[in-house]
Image: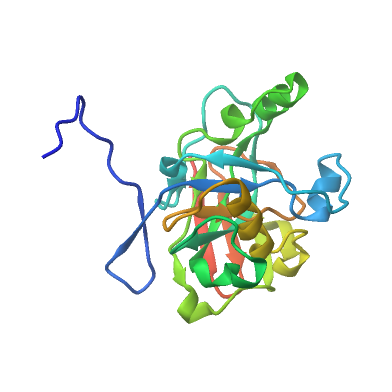
Amino acid sequence: MTNYAIKPPPIVALPILGRNEIFPVRRVYCIGRNYAAHAIEMGHNPDREPPFFFQKNPNNLDPSGKFPYPSKSNDVHHEVEMAVMLKSGGINIKVSEALTHIFGYAISLDMTRRDLQGAQKKLGRPWEVGKAFERSAPVGPIHLVSKTGYLTKGLISLRVNDVLKQEGDLNQMIWKIPDIISYLSDHFELNGGDVILSGTPSGVGSINKGDTLVATIDGLGSLKVIVS
């Protein structure tokens, strides 16, 4: 028996649609500005440059359907994304082999304290204070890739209080999922339990307490989140 100095934290795990098993989360990688229209709305050139990533913490993923408005911010934004769950990994994974590592997909939101993120950007500092706060990644149940097939196209959208705010297509990603997996594996050793948030289409904006967010991705149904 291992003699820990303090009680170890629980393993973060997510529900799998149609199964009693749960998916243990190891790491969470998020790609930035992966849709051209979103890059433009954030004031950046949409040309296909090398991708960049930031990380959220495993326990930022929250399947509860509730999003408590965080402290220290007056400008929290919604960003609808497709989450990709890996069943295996490695280093220097070839693009042609990357899809074989996928376990499944889910709808997720990359909630962002935009005012805090903006302040960090101006200072050339990391984004974690704006991105990796508690419950900052609402997420739906995982859909097995064996049921969905590999998702390369399809509508991705978000409504706030039944008003359409974000809409795009998965095929509009600048860096496709195989590219992302391969690139990450050149810089990190990927493994089963890793989660990748694959970017958001344009239309990001502020949310308020009491709002109802409904995110939709073709083949994955919808995710409803209440802001409290």
- Image quarter of residue 215: bottom right
Foreground residue among 212 and 138: 138
Foreground residue among 211 and 147: 147
Q: How is the image coloured?
A: rainbow
Q: Is residue 53 above or below residue 118?
A: below
Foreground residue among 99 and 113: 99
| Picture residue at 51% right of the left edge, 47% below the top | 28
Foreground residue among 210 and 219: 219
Q: Is residue 109 above or below residue 223?
A: above
Q: Is residue 162 visible?
A: no
Q: Does residue 28 appear to the left or right of 49 in the view shown?
A: left
In this view, which residue lies farthest toward the left? 1
So how many labels did they put on this image? 0
| Picture residue at 62% right of the left edge, 37% below the top | 112
Q: Which x, y percent locates residue 35?
A: 77, 55
Q: Which x, y percent locates residue 19?
A: 31, 72
Q: Does residue 65 appear to the left or right of 182 in the view shown?
A: left
In this view, which residue lies farthest toward the front? 92
Q: Which x, y percent locates residue 99?
A: 57, 70
- Image quarter of residue 154: bottom right
| Picture residue at 77% right of the left edge, 52% below the top | 202
Quarter in which the N terminus is drawn: top left
Q: Is residue 86 visible?
A: yes
- Image quarter of residue 92: bottom right
Q: Which x, y percent locates residue 15?
A: 36, 61
